[in-house]
Amino acid sequence: MQTVNPSIRSRYSDVKKIKVFENEFMPHINSIYNFAFKLTFDEDEAKDLVQDTYLKAYRFINSFQEGTNAKAWLYRILKNNFINDYRKKNKQPAKVDYQEVEQFYNSEDTPSNAAVSLQLETTKDMTGDEVSNALNSLTVDFRTVIILCDLEDFTYEEMAKILDIPIGTVRSRLHRARNLLRDKLSSYAHSMGYN
Amino acid sequence: MSECPDCKCNDSKKYFRILNLVLDNEASDDQRALFNLHIKECAVCFAHYNIELQLRQLIKTKVSYKLIPEELAQEIRSRVID
């Protein structure tokens, strides 16, 4: 946001600001809330996070170019808010060592063995709660890329901008996240006797 | 996994990479065409394609969506207008 070139910065009147806020930002509030909840697992924290995100979006509205990707812009603000405020507040580890994990596996181009073991029949009877629980058990960085890509249909490029990481990292993180999720779903399906 | 046991191609790494691009709608037309041609001949790559597709569909159709509390949007609107 702050890096936007001042020469192309929009200047909105107060009336226009409200209009942009209502027409471009508010339509995304449901998915923003869903994302916030999936990051925090707490309704009150999710509400605060969404509120902070929208108030910040309004405060910086002159940095937003009307007609550009408002959804990605809001997600980026929310992600930054989450990292800056909530991780510190909750005294969670600053960063999972996923980069080390990624380098170790470096497996984007190869399937995992788990991929072979998870067959369609083993998961078709799983409930939404079971699949959600498996997703929620991933660390926040892995969970985030799956939500952004598979639930919200962001492109790799949009995800790279939202998360401030290179596209190559988006791809490898996504690949690793899906492998982990598949492992969890597979072992859960086995333990529940779905196969 | 450096060699695909089904079609004996030495390019399975390449196809697994393209597989993800295809399923995530990130592949170019050429990559998509190449991949579609390949999975007609290679049962292993085709099986992996279906497994990856299945995982994405599972996430999309079964992961619950948390609905926003009704009053939150209104709260935010009034705070902005004030």
Image (spheres, coloured by chain):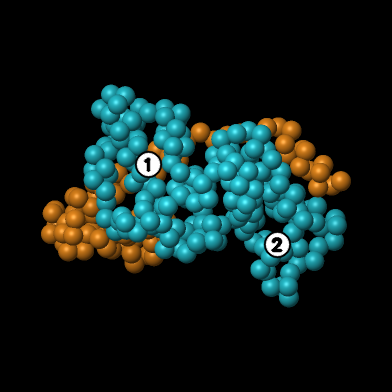
Chain colours: A cyan, B orange
The foreground one among A156 and B1 is B1
Instruction: State the residue lying farthest toward the bottom.
Output: A7
Q: Quadrant of the N terminus of chain A?
A: bottom right
What is the x, y in percent for residue A9? 74, 69
Marked residue nearer the N-terminal end (2 or 1): 2
The foreground one among A65 and B72 is B72
User: Element type at marker 1?
Assistant: helix
- Viewer-side label of 2, 1: 1
Determine which residue is flagged by label 1: A181
What is the x, y in percent for residue A45? 64, 37
Q: Are marks 2 and 1 in contact (CB under 8 Å)?
A: no
Q: Residue flagged by tag 2: what amino acid is it? A: Phe
Q: Which mark is residue B36?
A: none
The answer to whether residue A147 is left or right of residue B56 is right
Compared with B2, A55 (above or below) is above
- Other-residue count near label 2 (Cα within 10 Å), few / some / many at <14 / 14–19 / ≥20: many
The image quadrant of residue B2 is bottom left
The answer to whether residue B61 is left or right of residue B14 is right
Q: Residue at x 37, y 41 (%)?
A: A181
Q: Residue flagged by tag 1: what amino acid is it? A: Leu
Q: Residue at x 63, y 39 (%)?
A: A46
The foreground one among A149 and A137 is A137
Instruction: State the residue lying farthest toward the top.
Output: A193
Q: Pointer 2 indicates a residue of which chain?
A: A
